[in-house]
Image (cartoon, rainbow, N blue to C red):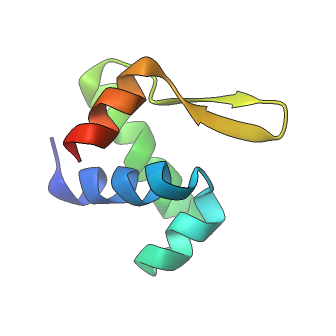
Amino acid sequence: MNLDDLEAFSAFAECLNFTHAAEKLSISQPALHAKIRNLGKNLGAGLYVKEGRSLRLTLSGEKLARYA
């Protein structure tokens, strides 16, 4: 598990918004999305789902957010 990816996920989990989390981390939105996708792939679990225009953490994402 990459600590940069974990930090990126933590920022995302706080606001559930890629744009705001990317701004908070001073990285691009595509870079943030790639970090979170990598983390989910390495863990073998989806970390969030899109519901309409909203995002929410999956159970795995919630557990990881508490750890992060």
Residue at 49 percent of width and 23 percent of height? 58
Picture quadrant of residue 42: top left
Label count reads 0
Q: Nearer the viewer, residue 55 or 30?
A: 55
Does 29 sit above or below residue 38? below
Q: Residue furthest front?
A: 66
Position of 56 with respect to 1 (left or right) is right
Picture quadrant of residue 65: top left
Picture quadrant of residue 1: top left
Query: Residue 11 appears at what percent x and percent y?
Result: 41, 60
Residue at 45 percent of width and 23 percent of height? 46
Query: Residue 16 appears at what percent x and percent y?
Result: 58, 50
Query: Residue 55 appears at what percent x and percent y?
Result: 66, 38
Residue at 42 percent of width and 45 percent of height? 36
Q: Residue furthest right?
A: 52
Query: Residue 6 appears at what percent x and percent y?
Result: 26, 50
Does 30 sit above or below residue 55? below
Position of 52 with respect to 19 (left or right) is right
Q: Residue furthest bottom?
A: 26
Q: Nearer the viewer, residue 11 or 30?
A: 11
Q: Nearer the viewer, residue 1 or 66?
A: 66
Residue at 64 percent of width and 66 percent of height? 19
